[in-house]
Image (spheres, grey):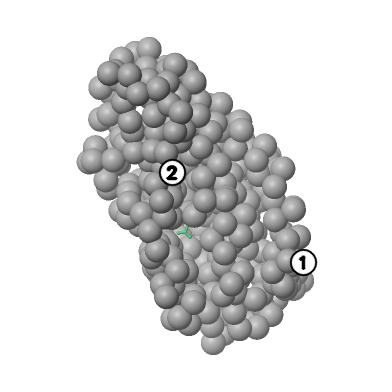
């Protein structure tokens, strides 16, 4: 049975919502299954909008890629055929390459770094860029933690241990290039197809945060996790810019306010849940966590070699310099 293809019931945010003559319903796509960062963020935003509009605005949530792959939903939101989508930042990069600065390996090394880059000047600039490039507005950020590497075949401690494994990656040039530096040719694949590919052995492994591995029940088809932190998973909530521009100024302010409050909530969600989930993957689901050899040095040295190749697409070397500077580091 193709587990991830099963339809998941549409989760109306609240059955008790008032359905007055003026009430409106927006549709929100969510790439992941229920039970993770993306869904928690979606529920929070929907609840806040409901409260802030006295029940006039309902948001229906469609988790588990029901409305298309994450990259497909960017196109749908951009064309104003879908109101909202929650997805991983790496799936926006192909539409607005400057956000690639957030997915360059080993730039963001933990939650604090992620907060600084998304909630400061750099985050504002990237939000403007996605409006300009892709016609989508980032309203809010969720934080899912480091993308760790899972596989079904063997303990992997160093990049050389990857030899012989087929690893799924998002269709993201930066992530593809990182794996190539580690000595393997990864298989780019839509997120919505990943569980089935792991289950059927089309691929041996993938990378995503602990919270996502748990929400997607990857523990059913994966045994080993390598605790690397090459990319920190950021999950923006995006809205159709065309739709945003049709809202009244008051409504725009409510939407932006709900977005900011959802970001704050999502940050706490990560801090509150990640460690417990990591433990349960081992204790309840029997996964084995492997520490990267040599303090992750080979992973870091090889992956960061790709940075210069992406300077043009992220908007110049100075954009990476600015990001690192905001994090108290420098390029060399
Ligand atoms: C991906 O691997 O394509 C995404 O990061 C998955 C996600 O949205 O959680």
Q: Say which residue label 1 marks.
A: 283
Residue 173 seen anywhere in this rendered image of the structure: no
The quadrant where residue 149 appears: bottom right
The residue at 74%/53% (across/down) is: 276
Classify 147 as above or below 18: below
Q: Which residue reaches farthest bottom?
A: 164
Q: Which residue is found at the position 27% from the left and 45% from the top? A: 76
Quarter of the figure with the N terminus: bottom left
The answer to which of 264 and 277 lies nearer the viewer is 277
- Mark 2 secondary-structure assignment: strand
Which numbered disc flags the more N-terminal residue, 1 or 2?
2
Q: Which residue is mark 2?
A: 11
In the rendered view, tell whether residue 29 sits above or below residue 198: above
Residue drawn at (62%, 54%) of the image = 211
> Would residue 152 be found to the left or right of residue 12 on screen?
right
Give the x, y percent position of residue 86.
44, 44
């Amino acid at each position: 049975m193709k587990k991830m293809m099963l339809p998941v019931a549409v989760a109306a945010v609240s059955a008790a919502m008032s359905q007055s003559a003026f009430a409106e319903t927006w549709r929100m796509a969510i790439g992941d299954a229920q039970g993770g960062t993306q869904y928690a963020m979606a529920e929070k935003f929907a609840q806040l909008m409901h409260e802030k509009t006295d029940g006039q605005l309902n948001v229906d949530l469609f988790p588990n890629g029901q409305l298309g792959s994450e990259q497909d939903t960017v196109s749908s939101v951009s064309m104003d055929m879908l109101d909202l989508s929650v997805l991983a930042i790496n799936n926006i990069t192909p539409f607005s390459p400057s956000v690639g600065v957030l997915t360059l390996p080993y730039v963001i090394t933990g939650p604090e770094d992620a907060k600084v880059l998304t909630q400061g000047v750099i985050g504002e600039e990237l939000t403007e860029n996605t409006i300009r490039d892709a016609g989508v507005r980032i309203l809010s950020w969720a934080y899912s933690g480091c993308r760790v590497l899972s596989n079904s075949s063997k303990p992997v401690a160093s990049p050389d241990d990857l030899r012989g494994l087929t690893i799924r990656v998002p269709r993201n040039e930066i992530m593809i290039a990182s794996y190539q530096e580690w000595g393997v040719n990864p298989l780019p694949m839509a997120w919505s197809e990943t569980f089935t590919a792991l289950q059927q052995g089309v691929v041996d492994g993938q990378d995503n945060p602990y919270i996502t591995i748990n929400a997607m029940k990857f523990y059913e088809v994966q045994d080993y996790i390598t605790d690397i932190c090459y990319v920190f998973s950021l999950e923006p909530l995006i809205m159709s810019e065309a739709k945003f521009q049709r809202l009244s100024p008051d409504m725009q302010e409510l939407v932006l306010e709900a977005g900011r409050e959802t970001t704050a909530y999502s940050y706490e969600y990560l801090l509150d849940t990640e460690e417990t989930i990591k433990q349960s993957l081992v204790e309840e689901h029997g996964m084995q966590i492997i520490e990267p050899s040599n303090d992750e040095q080979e992973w870091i040295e090889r992956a960061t070699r790709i940075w210069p190749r992406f300077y043009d697409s992220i908007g110049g070397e100075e954009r990476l310099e600015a990001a690192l500077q905001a994090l108290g580091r420098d390029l060399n």
